[in-house]
Image: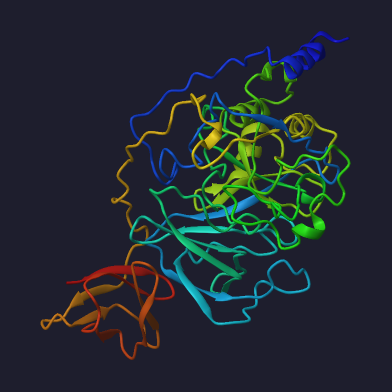
């Protein structure tokens, strides 16, 4: 028998091998835009020494070499507000997400050139879960599935989710299968490069529920921290299962490569897979959605800092989501996914299984982001009148629609300009920060 295969079998059966741990450099502080949420969030808590592992027996995928699910992350809070309207298209391929079928659902600071359409998204009906940082610099609003099909067009979505705090626990959000976060756990631009070092947070994955997620009437197909399973869980989960039944493997499960598995014996063929494997061992990955076809998926960023998939290919010279299995990266993904175990004692009182964490906790201290600057060169000028219950806007064109939003994106006034100077009554506004927005720019003012 091949020596390395024999060693893997021995490690699996008798838990005799201890994987060498990575040297982590712990910074004094962190940028909440790149490394959000509290140090005790599920996204930032490493696997612990008391973790109880149950083999998930994930079935080898056959539909594609590997796939990704893109979270849309917009963290530029001083962009002009974009009105987002309701669309009932959701995941129906016979309906057009670009066409609103209802009224305005929310207004969000999103650049007018961030096009999300059939021409730019991956797959036919991607999840397109979106997180947007609001101008108060801490509220994150989430929705799914977002579409904005052309510059100057109409933005749409189907579902809104509760706000979360950039500095809070950040568990929940816009992943429809589980209701888990659309920013926490996402592989971000700048991670998984040749210079970025180890990944310092839990990951997120999607699995084909028909092969890999368990349902019964007691569990309803999900477990903490997920708040739900898919609406079709009772009929679809495990319906195509071939491997042994694993009741622990449900929507929301924390999956990891067990601590006793020597990653160097797994014979990875690509460097990024070895880096990912370390993250799967040190932090694990939460199951957040159903792929609905026979593939695995990992959740990555598409946002104003770039697109993770494009950065990955530029760094490593191959696609992160190849269509075929006959390549080193796809074989490496099989090595990871087919060896994943459920951390069965992951719970609110023992995140990651409890005990001594495998890696240092995230720093409690955050970098100051209050200095984020508005990027556009303003042609508008907004100033108060002598009475201070009116504002005057200069530099605006005739017949321009002017909208005013508060710092949480609620529209409080709208008007159409008659001249290049417009006076607006703000006497009824409460004190605070407001954003006056036209079709091309947004400018702040304060009502005292």
Front residue of 374 and 234: 234
Q: How is the image coloured?
A: rainbow
**Where is residue 17, by image quadrant?**
top right
Front residue of 216 and 42: 216
Residue 422 lies left or right of residue 15; in this view the side is left
> Which residue is at the far bottom?
418
* Spot occupied by residue 220 in the image (x, y as percentages of width and height): 70, 55
**Where is residue 327, by image quadrant?**
top right
Quadrant of the rendering where the N terminus is positioned: top right
333 up-or-down from 213: above or below = above
> Which residue is at the far left?
386
* Spot occupied by residue 362 in the image (x, y as percentages of width and height): 42, 34
Q: Residue at x 59, y 65 (%)?
A: 146
Q: Residue at x 69, y 58 (%)?
A: 126
Residue 289 lies left or right of residue 140; in this view the side is right
Residue 151 lies left or right of residue 36; in this view the side is right
Front residue of 176 and 415: 176
17 up-or-down from 328: above or below = above
Quadrant of the rendering where the C terminus is positioned: bottom left
329 up-or-down from 204: above or below = above
> Which residue is at the far front?
218
80 up-or-down from 14: above or below = below
Front residue of 445 and 139: 139
* Spot occupied by residue 241 in the image (x, y as percentages of width and height): 86, 45
Q: Residue at x 10, y 81 (%)?
A: 386
* Spot occupied by residue 82 in the image (x, y as percentages of width and height): 47, 71
């Amino acid at each position: 028998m091949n020596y390395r295969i024999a060693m893997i079998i021995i490690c699996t059966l008798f838990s005799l091998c201890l994987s060498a741990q990575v040297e982590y450099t712990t910074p004094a502080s962190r940028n909440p835009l790149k490394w959000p949420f509290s140090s005790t969030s599920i996204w930032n808590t490493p696997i612990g020494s008391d973790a109880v592992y149950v083999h998930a027996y994930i079935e080898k995928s056959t539909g594609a070499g590997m796939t990704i699910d893109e979270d849309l992350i917009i963290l530029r809070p001083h962009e002009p507000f974009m009105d987002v309207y309701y669309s009932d298209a959701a995941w129906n391929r016979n309906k057009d997400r670009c066409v609103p079928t209802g009224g305005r659902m929310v207004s969000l600071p999103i650049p007018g050139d961030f096009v999300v359409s059939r021409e730019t998204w991956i797959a036919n009906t991607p999840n397109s879960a979106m997180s947007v940082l609001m101008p108060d610099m801490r509220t994150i609003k989430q929705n799914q599935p977002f579409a904005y099909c052309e510059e100057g067009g109409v933005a749409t979505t189907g579902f809104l989710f509760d706000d979360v705090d950039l500095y809070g626990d950040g568990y929940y959000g816009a992943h429809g299968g589980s209701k888990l976060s659309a920013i926490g756990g996402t592989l971000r631009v700048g991670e998984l490069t040749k210079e970025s070092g180890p990944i310092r947070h839990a990951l997120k994955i999607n699995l084909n529920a028909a092969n890999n997620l368990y349902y019964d009437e007691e569990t309803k197909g999900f477990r903490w921290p997920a708040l739900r399973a898919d609406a079709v869980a009772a009929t679809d989960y495990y319906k195509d299962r071939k491997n042994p039944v694993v009741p622990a493997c449900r929507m929301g499960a924390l999956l990891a490569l067990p601590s006793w598995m020597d990653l160097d014996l797994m014979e990875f063929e690509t460097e990024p897979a070895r880096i990912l494997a370390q993250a799967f061992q040190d932090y694990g990955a939460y199951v957040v959605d159903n792929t609905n076809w026979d593939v695995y998926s990992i959740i990555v960023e598409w946002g104003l800092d770039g697109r993770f998939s494009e950065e990955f290919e530029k760094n490593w010279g191959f696609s992160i989501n190849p269509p075929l299995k006959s390549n080193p990266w796809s074989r490496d993904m099989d090595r990871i996914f087919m060896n994943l175990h459920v951390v069965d004692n992951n719970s609110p009182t023992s995140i990651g299984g409890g005990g001594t964490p495998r890696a240092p906790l995230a720093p409690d201290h955050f970098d100051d982001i209050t200095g984020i600057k508005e990027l556009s060169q303003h042609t508008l000028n907004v100033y108060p009148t002598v009475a201070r219950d009116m504002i005057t806007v200069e530099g605006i064109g005739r017949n321009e629609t002017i909208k005013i939003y508060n710092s949480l994106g609620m529209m409080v006034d709208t008007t159409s300009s008659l001249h290049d100077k417009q006076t607006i009554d703000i006497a009824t506004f409460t004190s605070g920060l407001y954003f006056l927005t036209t079709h091309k720019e947004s400018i702040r003012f304060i009502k005292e």
